Image (spheres, helix red, strand yellow):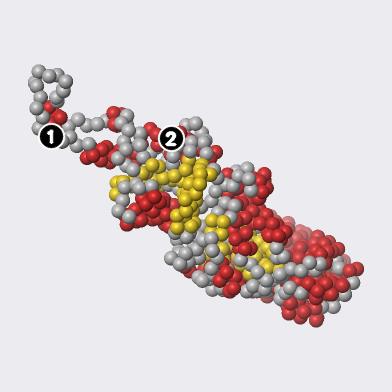
Amino acid sequence: MTKIKVRILIFILSLSSVFALPQVGSGQTNITEINRSTSLIAQMELNRSSRQFDKGVEHYKAGRFYSALEIFRQLMKKPISENSQLTASYLMAMKCNYHLEKYEEAKRIGRNFLTDFSDSNYLDDVYHCFGDIFIREGGYRTATESYLIARSVTVEPELAKQIDKKLKKLTNGFLTRDDITDLLAFEKVQSNRAILTLMLADAIIAEGDSDGAALTLFRMDINLIPKSFRDYYDVLRKRTYKQTEGNIVIGVVLPLTGINEEEGNAFLLGLKQAIVEVQQTRALNIILEVLDNEGDNLKTIECMDKLVGNPNVMAIIGPLSAVNSTVAVSTAKHYGIPFLIPVSTQSGLSTLGESIFQMNMDLIKRGQYIAEYAIRFLGLETVAVVSPAERLGIELVDGFVERADELGAQILDIQWYSGLPVDLKNQFKALRKVAFRLEEQYNQVEIIDLQFDTLDQTLVISEKDFFPELVEEEEISSSDSSKIVLSSIDGIFVPIHPGDINYVGSQISSYNFDTQLLGNMNWYDLDELSQEMIGPNVKGMIVFTDFIFPEDDEAMVVLSDRLQHHELRKMALHGYDITMFLASRLQKNITKHALAQNLNQAGMYRGISKLFSFTDHNPRENSSIHILRFEGDHFTKVNEIIADTLFIHSLQSP
């Protein structure tokens, strides 16, 4: 007999010894023993169910929702005599389905719970979960109704706090005045009626009727207002004191958590700074509905669905990444809601819908602008390129080469590299060969009929001076040729990725090009260029950037104090300027369609760091760029291109 079989036999024998019925004794003794055995079996089953439940909760807390759901499903099948936590198992199964986005199944379990356990202590949690499901599905009125039921039956202070927090978010324009009025018609709980009345006053203010809102608040019994909503009441009352142009709800989608959370929060910081200033100077009450997409495409779709489903959202700003922006456009384009894409440089986004606005110039257009300026304004006739072989470099170079060729410039060579540009020896040596051949063409020796005295040693004549084809050509080594300064290439375009200045800037001077360097926006980093081993190498470079750092602007001072890193300050400035641009086109009782027209017809807008303008050739895509020259220790703004037009500036340091 195997060891396993022996163990099983021992286990069976042990059970039989515990539960075996006595063979001898009175009938009363038999009944007592039977009851005792039954009780022991039931207790063991209850203990087993309890351990299973605890294991399910452990999985749930760790985010292993599929594993947790399987456990709770099994527990739901047991009668309450075998599972004392039956109602809790239903609740946890409902919550697992919610987190797995199986909303219909979650609602089915919730309905069964309400039918079978109408007097359960978990009613508040079930209604709370219903509210969360309806929020996910965009049913804001139904969600509000569920949250109100949950808060009316709960006795848990922590749960009540969570519910009130969510109800406060729903006051930001998610419900229409009719929605709130309908809910008030059936609501009996006085504290809930007080919350709905506050929401109603908010909706009335949004319609521009401050007096009507003030009267609504005046009729309220403030003693019925829950403590967590007293601050909301005070805010509403203050807003009725001044005439406003009505509430304007702006949706925002940003990565506030995840790998890009620093950039997302920096952008939001600049956006909020702009809102503060707008509300101090104009009678506009702008409400932000900020959603976190975590930098994820599916989350982005979810955020966009929520915002476009809210009838009060007037415009949407975000997200940040090119991929997230493309996904968001696919949702926004069907709803006609003005959608401002902040920083994506993906080509063609603005062409996907009449209300899609790309606030950053795409890379191909930037390349075209750089070529236009280099050839028409700087007069460069021969140009070359050293570029990364990724999307940023490829699209910039495509635009640059296409326009340079159209304008008649000679494209001498394009050198590509992949990964970090730690060693560009091969690329720059290849350019030197091209430049050297060109130098030889420019300096060909002409044979002239000279009369001279052979005794005169003033001229030292070499055979190769007149008959080079008879002399074996001497190969010019890299060490020899690198000592010669070459000026036959008029300009070299060197686009780089952020953070690559150290690598590329330290190598350029080693190859002795007397040429005009042209750089993209990622060269605009004075901290990096100020290094002794880099700055002198690229002095005189012309840098084309869509933003500049203002020196003395008050908003810049505020943002710089809170953000030390170069890239984060830049992102905050993006958020600030885009919000100020949008606010400049807002007005009383404006519709989404009218706002889209206002944005499309806007003339040039000059922010503190960015320029915004649109052209008929590139509708709804920003067509403005700053042109700077690096002077060795600072940048000087020399020109700017606005809507395809070059403007020359007096010298100034940005």
Q: Residues within 10 Å of mark 1 (few under 14, many from 20)?
A: few
Give whichever of 553, 51 is nearer the camera.
553
Give the quadrant of the C terminus: top right
Q: Which mark is on residue 447?
A: 1
Amino acid at circle 2: Asn
Pointer 2 and pointer 1: residues touching (CB < 8 Å)?
A: no
In the image: residue 353, left or right of residue 171 = left
x and y percentages locating residue 74 in the rendered image: 67, 67
x and y percentages locating residue 280 in the rendered image: 72, 59
Res. 446 in view:
yes
x and y percentages locating residue 99 in the rendered image: 65, 64
Give the quadrant of the N terminus: bottom right
x and y percentages locating residue 307 in the rendered image: 63, 68
Q: Nearer the viewer, mark 2 or mark 1?
A: 1
Give whichever of 583, 510 is nearer the camera.
583
Amino acid at circle 1: Ile
Q: Which residue is mark 2?
A: 537
Which residue is at a point 47% across and 64% down the rendered structure image? 615
In the image, residue 639 sits, relative to residue 458, either above or below, namely below
Calculate the distance from the C-alpha at mark 2 to the C-alpha at mark 1.
39 Å
Which residue is at a point 35% across and 34% down the rendered structure image? 511
